[in-house]
Image (spheres, helix red, strand yellow):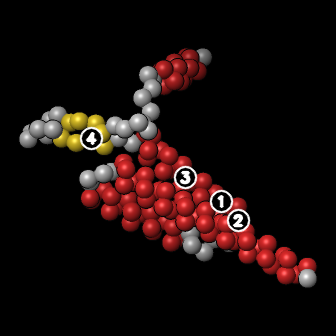
Amino acid sequence: MFVKSAESNATATSRILRYAVLKAYRDLLKAQRETFYGDILTLRAARDKTREEFLRNRNLNEESQIQEQINRATEIADTLRRNVVQAVSVDQDKTRFRLMLNENHELGDNNSLKRSQSSASLQKST
């Protein structure tokens, strides 16, 4: 009876991990569609790369490795949503562009970057 219980726990864990992997995959594809809306070539390249990476990691067996890849996919989707902006040309000469921003994009004031640059300058001067 103990063996069946251990087997059912392992099966339940593998089902939960499988669900989490599929959820991360779908979420990453959705983030790509949102970020690269209307850019067929970029969408196709991103989708192909995502599929390639998920297939490459298909045979991972260790739960920690699988969870690490799930976290990586989630972080990439989050970065796409918050930090990657598509620019669309608004004139024939392609000299002016419009940024395709949405409510998910971070619109900080760059103070954190300025602070990190000034602290790096201080470290170099010492």
Q: Position of residue 110 (x, y in %)?
A: 45, 24
Expressed as whole percent of the image width and height from the top left, the position of residue 35 reads 36, 48
* Residue of label 3: 74
* Residue bearing mark 4: 87
- Report, in whole angstroms, how far the alpha carbon at label 1 lies from the one at label 2: 6 Å
Q: Quadrant of residue 97?
A: top left
Dot 4 alpha-carbon crowd within 10 angstroms: few under 14, some 14 to 19, many 20 or more: few
Q: Helix, strand, or loop for circle 1?
A: helix
Is residue 124 shown to the viewer in this render? no
Q: Is residue 75 above or below residue 25?
A: above
Horizontal side of 91 relative to 117 (left or right) equals left
Tell me whether circle 1 and circle 4 mark residues in contact (CB < 8 Å). Answer: no
The mark that comes first in sequence, 4 or 3, is: 3
Mark 4–mark 2 contact, CB under 8 Å? no
**Dot 2: within a 10 Å radius of its alpha carbon, few (fewer than 14), some, or many (20 or more) residues?**
few
N-terminal label among 2 and 3: 2
How crowded is the residue under tag 3: few (<14 C-alpha within 10 Å), some, or many (20+)?
A: some
Relative placement, left or right, of 74 versus 11 is left
Q: CA distance from mark 4 to mark 2?
A: 39 Å
Q: Residue 67, labelled with which disc?
A: 1
**Residue 57, horizontal then vertical, whole percent:** 56, 69
